[in-house]
Amino acid sequence: MEEYKKLLFGKSYINGEWFSANTETFEVLNPADNSVVARVSNENAQAVSQAIDAAHAAFKPWSKKSGKERSVIMQRWYALIMENKESIAVIMTLESGKPLQESRGEVDYGAAFIQWFAEEAKRLYGDIIPGYTADRRIMVIKQPIGVVGAITPWNFPLAMITRKVSPALAAGCTVVIRPSEETPLTALAITHLAEKAGFPKGVFNMVVGTDASSMGKILCESSLVSKISFTGSTRVGQILSTQSVSTLKKLSLELGGNAPFIIFEDADIDAAVKGAIAGKFRFSGQTCVCVNRILVHEKIYEIFTDKFVKAVSELKPGNGMQEGINIAPLINKKAMDRVEGFVEDAISKGGKILIGGKRINENFFAPTVIGDATAAMNFAKEEIFGPVAPIFKFSTDEEAINLANDTIYGLASYLYTNDLKRSWKISEALEYGIVGINEGLISSEVAPFGGIKHSGSGREGSKYGIEDYVEIKYICIGNIE
């Protein structure tokens, strides 16, 4: 178990060197018990500026390498992460509170993006278009966009990095990564492995610090950065968009969610319960695609609710390093207060606590189910990001669609039905970038991940994921005859 300490690093990584500009540090805490996991050097916007310069200098030689050359280095990075899977998972659990089994799953999931885009590096195809006159030939090629700034959240400290930088690196871009200060240790561990894999100096840069606003601002306003990829809140996404206006940057934004989970009267109820548990309570509801609202047809409301509450009662909160734990702590006090506020609001508006509904201690909130949920309750419009499952009732397909779409967000959605026609109809009507039919876990490196409306723009993963990191160039050759 102590093997993980070999992957603990406390400095940023800029231009191929472990970097520390000052003696100021900050503590990384284990949210399960508030113990100090490590101390990390606290860098600032000046360090980000140095990283941008390094990435800019490295861009041209990196972009000139063949896709196969870039692929070889990325495959080594993938292999090193998989060789160190257990140590990385332990670090992730210690700093995020995520149950160890979920952390292992994230290592697999996150590393898969590296492997996928290492292969795609060799397949960045263009086109030959028939000329519009007999003496002209038209070619379309794809070229890397330039330096990419990646700003990533705490809830997936490995996967949110690899999902962004893998297509960037594969396309020939260089990267400057700013991970969350809540979970920097996983990011620094995979940075060490990227160094071992052989990325040239300046291609891969990681800057860690607590001044998120100024670090993000310099990435957005720098004329040397061509693209920003951000995962986080809609509010911060709007700020970054505004800050990027002067340089007309390309933006990929994966923002907030308000995922509906619709269960129709013809659904397999046991499968729906299983899917709802997985979709709602993974990492205690602290993921952007987590179920936010459970919409149940009135004919099966009681039977689903009874089975769902029983399944929730079997969930086990605790320190993620212990076997059998499947409910993590909330990341900090602010998150705890927010979740508690949602529950208090629901009770004040007629909601019924069917299980849970309160703090277990300062770090954990009990897995909670709220019956008789209504559109007047705050969580009907806002993202919960915690282990609280409100259950709404509907009577018709149209009502379900209207309830589901009654939100500014549009990331993930889920529906359970055994009616083929209904599955098509509802999927097409849902205003979301992702729809899961009879399935509560829908993320994969082979599929395009992203939302619409206030959930952002752009797609990560799949063959579409590399498109946001390239420019399309049209070349016309004239006077052939």
Image: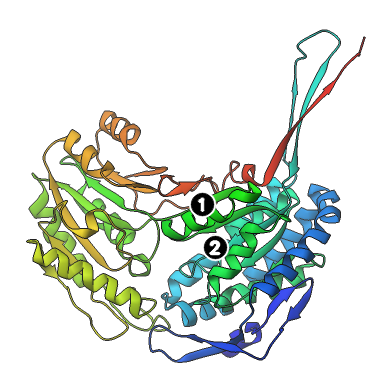
Mark 1, secondary structure of its residue: strand
What label sits on residue 253 in the rendered view?
A: 1
In the rendered image, which quarter is residue 108 located in? bottom right
Q: Residue furthest front?
A: 246
Q: Is residue 327 at least partly visible in the picture?
A: no
* Total number of numbered discs in the rendering: 2
Q: CA distance from mark 2 to mark 1?
A: 15 Å
Q: Tell me if 293 is positioned left or right of 168 in this view.
A: left
- Residue at 83 percent across and 48 percent down: it is 66
Q: Identify the residue under disc 2.
A: 159
Quadrant of the image containing the N terminus: bottom right
Quadrant of the image containing the C terminus: top right
- Residue at 30 percent across and 76 percent down: it is 336
Residue 191 to residue 407: above or below:
below
Q: Residue 478: x and y, percent?
A: 87, 17
Mark 1 neighbour density, 10 Å: few (under 14) some (14–19) many (20 or more): many
Residue 277 to residue 80: above or below:
above
Q: Tell me if 129 is positioned left or right of 272 in this view.
A: right
